Image (tube, helix red, strand yellow):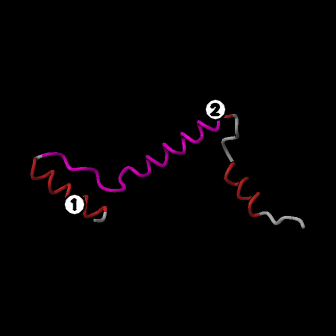
Amino acid sequence: MSVTQQYLLDSYRARLHGEPEPPAPGRHDLGLVREVRDHRRFCAVIAGRPVHGRLQRTLTRWLRPRAL
């Protein structure tokens, strides 16, 4: 069963029982991504690592041609 089918089934059951409908799938994804980002930044600060530019520095290190 797909997420959409499960959502439609849950909505139908909620209407039958007079309960509030569940939130639509994906409705809170952006908030979750922000919370994960904030948590990772917090953990970096606590560990004494730089907060900004870590991804770019890592990609540069991985993609930089190595001298033979």
Q: Quadrant of residue 26?
A: bottom left
Q: Earlier in the sequence, mark 1 or mark 2?
A: 1
Check disc 1 and report the residue beneath it.
8
- Disc number for residue 46: 2
Q: Position of residue 57 (x, y in %)?
A: 73, 53
- Disc number for residue 44: none
Q: Of helix, strand and loop, which mostly describes the magenta segment? A: helix
User: Which residue sits furthest top?
Assistant: 46
Decide whether residue 26 is among the magenta residues.
Answer: yes
Q: Residues within 10 Å of mark 1 (few under 14, many from 20)?
A: some
Q: Secondary structure at mark 1?
A: helix
The boundaries of the magenta stretch are 19-45
Q: Quadrant of residue 49?
A: top right
Residues marked 1 and 2 touching at CB (< 8 Å) = no
* Callout 2 amino acid: Ile
Residue at image coords 54%, 39%: 39
Q: Secondary structure at mark 2?
A: helix
Residue at image coords 15%, 45%: 19
Q: Position of residue 30 (x, y in %)?
A: 44, 51
* Callout 1 amino acid: Leu
